[in-house]
Image (spheres, coloured by chain):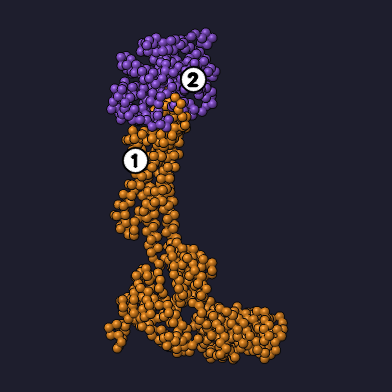
Amino acid sequence: MTGSTSPVSRMEILKLAIADLRAETLLTFCLIGSLAAIGAPLLILDGLRTGIVESLRQDLVGDPVFREVRPAETRPYDETFFAALRARSDVDFVMEGITRGASSIIVSASDAASSQARPRVESETILDMLPTAPGDPLLTSYAAQVPDAGGAVLSAEAAVQLKVKLDDRLTLEIGRQRTSAREVETVEAWVKGVLPARADPLPRIYLPFALVRDIESYREGYAVSERDWPGSPPDVVPGFDGLYILSERPLKATVQSRLQTLTGFFIGEPGEPGGFVKRLGMTFPEEQSVFRLSAIERLAGPGVLRRVISVLRGQNYDVFPYVDHLVVTIEGPGGEMSPALPVRTSDNLRHLFEAPVAEINRIQVPADLGYRVGETVTLIAATDGDPVRVPAVIAALSENPSVQFVELSAALGGMLRRGQKQRVRYDSLTDRLRVERTSFRGFRLYTETIDQVPALVRHMQGLGVDVVAQVGTIERILLLDQGLMRLFLIIAIIGGAGASVVLLTSLYAAVERKQASLGHLRILGISRGDIFVFPVYQALIMALVAVAAAALSAHIIAALINTFQAEQLGLKGDICRITLDAHVYACLIALGLSFTSSFFAALRATRIDPADAMRQE
Amino acid sequence: MTSDIVRFRDVKRYRGGGERTFELVVPELRIERGRFVALVGASGSGKSTLLDLLGLVLRPSAGGTFLFSPDGEGVGTVDIVETWRQGNDDPLAALRRRSIGYVLQTGGLIPFLDVSHNIGLPLRLLGRKPEGRTISAALERLGLGGYEEKMPSTLSGGERQRVAILRALAHGPAMVLADEPTAALDRERARHVVEHFRELAQAQGTAIVMVTHDEQLVSGLADMVVRFNRVSTPDHAGTIRYISDVTAGDFVQ
């Protein structure tokens, strides 16, 4: 009869392979059992790795403390800075803040019962004040409601110090020092929440942003009309990089050391002529003793100068404050601009406080700029914000063409120098330089997840913003994850190798043992290529069944571990988590290993000579 | 007209090498459809070698002609010597599963398949579905009713051989090769099995080639008997050469 010569369907080979496995139930189960015995512990190990790392991570993920990115320095942050951060998808919450550390207020608890009539002060403490706003993750995730007007949230430590509880009344005392008088305003607030120590270990009070901002404004001297707090925009206080003290006789060592210790910010040393001439534009007085005090980081203000003068009381001396790093541009009446010129200051200590600009704005400029004495020009100096423009009168011309500088009064030089660190504006109505309030000195920021923290920190550092975050803790967990993963891989490789050897030898032995049957199949017309897949199919089937068995037993053991071990370890959630991915990988790896392990058995099967099988049983 | 399934001319098979060589020479052999051919001879005389050659599991040595026409009448004739020479197992395997049935000494049943699956296997390898009823009926006829789900290891020698015969014929092959199929049985039983075998084969026009060392077993049944005569090889001392000799059988209708 005419039959087809189409190849034997692989499905038939598969059925034969399965029939063979089923016929040798015991052997098949032994092999599957030994494979599952390797697979199950590996699945559990991977589950433990995933679970432990995940619960550690979960602790952090759920804890906004680890999602916070804090400013490491006090500097102005303007609206565009905040707008850019709000536009980022990895930023969960960002709000304007105030200078950390310079935000202490005196808080006292008043007995709510005896309120209105005679508030009895229970306790009083100094708390660090932080602004908050709706959506604040720190407050919301610790189940404290975000306070609205008249509300406050305390940290655990603050609540302990004040001996208050929810809905108790607080009195906030906000003081400021203005023209040597201390002014105080008070605000009342009710405790709307207390954070656990874990959320904030420091004595802190969280207040609505509007109140915090008003308090800061008031402290800086501004009026807050909504609260009837008086004030005016503060004048710019001059700041100096240092000063020279000229005296007939050298200063005594005791005076020198008192100058340094009492004034705080100074390094004292003998003045050397080069710096002296460059800074002050005067010839170095060979017959006098010159002593220099220089500021570190901060500028020296009038308070420092006052203390210096009091130390020197009774001596015969001259004091010349100076500024470094200050350049100005001069704009003439016709709008012509000079090049940027370095500034020198001359002694004019009488006007260090509250001076109208008209009293301190006489300047000396190089003659070759072409101005005449008595002409009015505009001084332009860079500030923290827009450049400041101050009117000035040409008082003198310097003829020495080799030295190009502008000589200002010490008061004006100091103010412009201060303006480099603050946002200042010339107010023509009062003829004064005023501190302008347009930026914020800090921020509070939380990312969406802890994983975004390292990248955001790098982003901020790239912008030149120094920030602090719990990157270390997060990265320690990543490292732990990687370490555990590496350990797991080593164990998995050993286990996989063992499983491969078991499979390889078992399958090879099986083919060897079944030579006759396989030979008969060859006689019955199964080609060499088809007999090749017979042990391969068997290996793949056993691998899949072994993975299933391993997964089943691993899940049972994982459930036991999660029920009885998790609590002892003090970890939240399941500590043994066998993920879907783990199953998929286990299947793929098992299939891959069984395929390669069956190769030698398959090769052996193809070498079986059907002629030998004719006479074998 | 010709209904030859197999045509051999000068087919040789050498085995061994060096000191001792075994040679089988088949000058002429034609197997027709539906015939019962007995290969008779002492062990080592080459009857199994001839069966292996016919069974397409042993490669003939170079030279000679071996044509296989499973459909008879010269249709679809395959040059087996050439196919072996090409070294591809697939066409030979295809011929084996389509056109040849095998009954081995102790049956050659696949140990991990039950009786019914063993019998159905040749059909399934051809991509056809065996009919359970047909198998059951055939088992019934051979006195093996209800044996469908038994495993080969639980059968007696005679039962095993009968199942093997059913399997060999299941897909209607052109030729069934049987290698001492009754070796494990007593004479009476053996005779019985062979008679059954012959009836079934004739009913579907299948040629049977049966190896036996016991000529009596096939006497009165074979259409053709092939014997193997040892010839002297004076120039090759180490060579054992057998030449086949075909005689008409003593089958009497």
User: In the picture, which quadrant includes the N terminus of chain A?
Assistant: top left
The residue nearer to you, when weighing A453 against A316, is A453
x, y (%) of residue A390?
A: 60, 85
Chain B, hue in figure: purple
- Residue B170 lies, with reference to residue A194, above or below; the image says above
**Label 1 marks which chain's residue?**
A
Image quadrant assignment for residue A158: bottom left
Q: Residue at x 53, y 89 (%)?
A: A353
Chain displayed in orange = A
The residue nearer to you, when weighing A283 against A462, is A462
- For label 1, the crowd category at 10 Å Cα-Cα, with few meaning under 14, some 14 to 19 and many 20 or more, is some
The residue nearer to you, when weighing A29 against A364, is A29
Instruction: Tell me the kind of residue under disc 2.
Output: Glu
Q: Say which residue label 1 marks.
A: A33
x, y (%) of residue A557?
A: 31, 49
Between disc 2 and disc 1, the foreground one is: 2
